[in-house]
Image: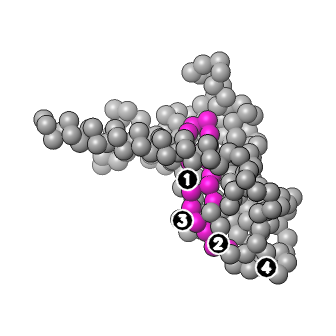
Amino acid sequence: MHRLKMFLLALSLTVLGGCAESSALIKTSSTSMRTDIYEELTNVGTAPKGFTDLRIIATLKTHKPGIFSAKDIHGTPDYKLLLNIDGQAVQVQGTLRNENSEPMKLVDPEVGDGIRYRFSKILRLKAGPHRVVVALPDDEVAVAREITLSDGTANTLVVEPIYSTVPGKRPPRHLTTTSFKEGIRSLRLMLNGKEI
């Protein structure tokens, strides 16, 4: 019994520590410290020598507005993606639509009635190493990664949601069931098809 209590305490401290780290990262990344890191483009072209293009794409699903409170901005145009590269920040507005999807596989975290967001931004920046922070401030979720972009290339950074676990439900083979209805607990970043 003592071991179980210690395990639960350690787990809760890890979760709280992760939330505190995300909150601090969001706070420091929300304001631009620089304005010369990248320029926003309307489409990918051929980057001049010394530069590279980076397309950022994220799709995710949230519950409809007003489910939990009138002040909840999930399911509204006010729900945004925060992007910060080397100290230059931008809030990315998403396009949204109603979506009531049927199961596509045995365990599908996006089954049900909700709002589908699609965020997209194309940036031109100097080739080389960069620190990228991607966050969903309203979910207090943020991740930071170091990336290196080669000269003259067109790159794609895909941001995928990792949804929270559904309490009390266990599908076959004891897999963990997650659902968009439980919120987003983290983000997975894929640069040119490889997880970073």
The residue where tag 1 is placed is 143
- Magenta segment: does it hold 143? yes
Q: Would you name the residue on which mark 3 appears?
A: 196
The N terminus sits in image quarter: top left
Badge 1 marks a residue whose secondary structure is: strand
Residue 196 lies in quadrant: bottom right
Q: Main secondary structure of the magenta part?
A: strand
The residue mark sitting in front, 3 or 2, is 2
Q: Which amino acid, mark 1?
A: Val
The location of residue 188, given as percent across then percent down, is 54, 55
Q: Mark 1 Cα within 10 Å, few/some/many (few <14, many 20+)? A: some
Q: Which mark is residue 66?
A: none
Circles 4 and 2 in contact, beta carbons < 8 Å = no
Do the numbered discs 2 and 1 sit on residues whose CB atoms are within 8 Å? no
Q: Residue 50 carries which label?
A: 4
Task: State the CA–CA distance, disc 3 to disc 1.
Answer: 11 Å
- Residue span colored magenta: 132-149
Q: Badge 4, how many Cα within 10 Å: few under 14, some, many 20+? A: few
N-term mark: 1 or 4: 4
Q: Distance between the residues labelled 1 and 4?
A: 27 Å
Q: Is residue 39 left or right of residue 168?
A: right
Using the image, tell me which numbered label, if any, was put on residue 129.
2
Q: Is mark 4 on a helix, strand or loop?
A: loop
Q: Residue furthest top?
A: 70
Mark toward the start of the polypeptide (2 vs 1): 2
User: Which residue shows up at 56% across the image and 34% down it?
Assistant: 112
Q: In this view, does 149 lie above or below 4?
A: below
State yes or no: residue 82 in magenta: no
Disc 4 residue type (three-letter): Gly
The picture places residue 143, in percent across and down from the top left corner, at 55, 53
